[in-house]
Image (cartoon, rainbow, N blue to C red):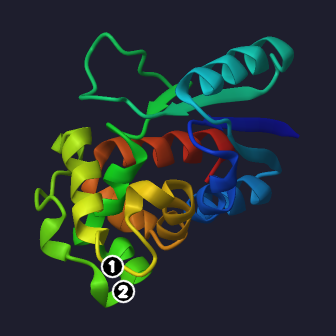
Amino acid sequence: MAAVYVWCEGSPRLRPGFDKFFRKVKIMAKAGRHRFRLVPCGSRSETRKDFEDACRRKPGATNILLIDAEGAIDRTMPRDDRHVYMVELMESWFLANRGSAVEVFYGNCLRKASLPANPDIERIPKHDVLTGLDNATRDCPKGQYSKNKVDHALGILERLDPAHVRAASPECDRIFETLRRLVGD
C-alpha cells in the first residue's frame, strides 16, 4: 500500500477541517488502496522540519509540504508535486464564493461588505484578508476572528466547498490535481 502524507501548516486542532475539505481525495486514496494522511504540524518552521524529517524517515512514502506562501507565489519558490501552497494564507480560501462559508459560520452578524471584494482570492494581500475578517466579525457573538483564530478557522474550514475554492484559486486546484494524480482516479 502506497502512502501519501501531506504535512500542513496550521494548528493540529485544524485536522478535522482539513480532513473534511480533502474528503474526496481521502475517498479516492482508499479506493486506490493508498494510505492518505493530512498532518497539521503548527507553525511554518515546524511544518517544514516535520516534512524534512519525514522525507528522511519515510523515503518510500510520498511526502508533500503544504504551507502558506506568505505572499505572492514567485518563480524562486519550489513548485513541484512535493511543494504546494495555500496562496498567501489559508484564510484566502475563506473568501471563495464571496465568503459564503464565513457567512454560514458567523450568521447574520457578519459585516460581509468588510470582506475583500476581489474575486481573485490569490491576489488579495495577507493583511487585507486578515483585516477584512476582523472587521467583518467585530460585532459577532462568536467573537472577532483574530481573537478566536483556530476555533473559527476550524469552523469555517469545515464549511468550505472545495469546488468553490478550486474555482477561485488555481493554486488550490493544483493541490487537488496533484493529490488526485498521486492517489489515482
- Tag 1's secondary structure? helix
- Labelled pair 1, 2 in contact (Cβ < 8 Å): yes
Q: Is residue 72 above or below residue 33?
A: above
Instruction: Report whether 131 appears left or right of 14.
Output: left
The spot of residue 103 in percent (x, y) is 33, 79
Q: Is residue 23 above or below residue 53?
A: below
Residue visible at 71% across and 23% down in the picture: 50
Numbered circle sitting on residue 159: none
Residue with the most extreme bottom position = 108
Residue visible at 78% across and 27% down in the picture: 61
Instruction: Indicate the quadrant where residue 13 lies.
Output: bottom right
Residue visible at 36% across and 72% down in the picture: 102
The spot of residue 181 in percent (x, y) is 57, 41
Between 61 and 91, the one lying in front of the other is 91
- Tag 2's secondary structure? helix
Q: Amino acid at mark 1?
A: Glu
Which residue is the site of mark 1?
103
Q: Amino acid at mark 2?
A: Gly
The spot of residue 107 in percent (x, y) is 36, 86
Which residue is the site of mark 2?
107
Instruction: Report whether 49 appears left or right of 146.
Output: right
Instruction: Indicate the quadrant where residue 168 lies.
Output: bottom left
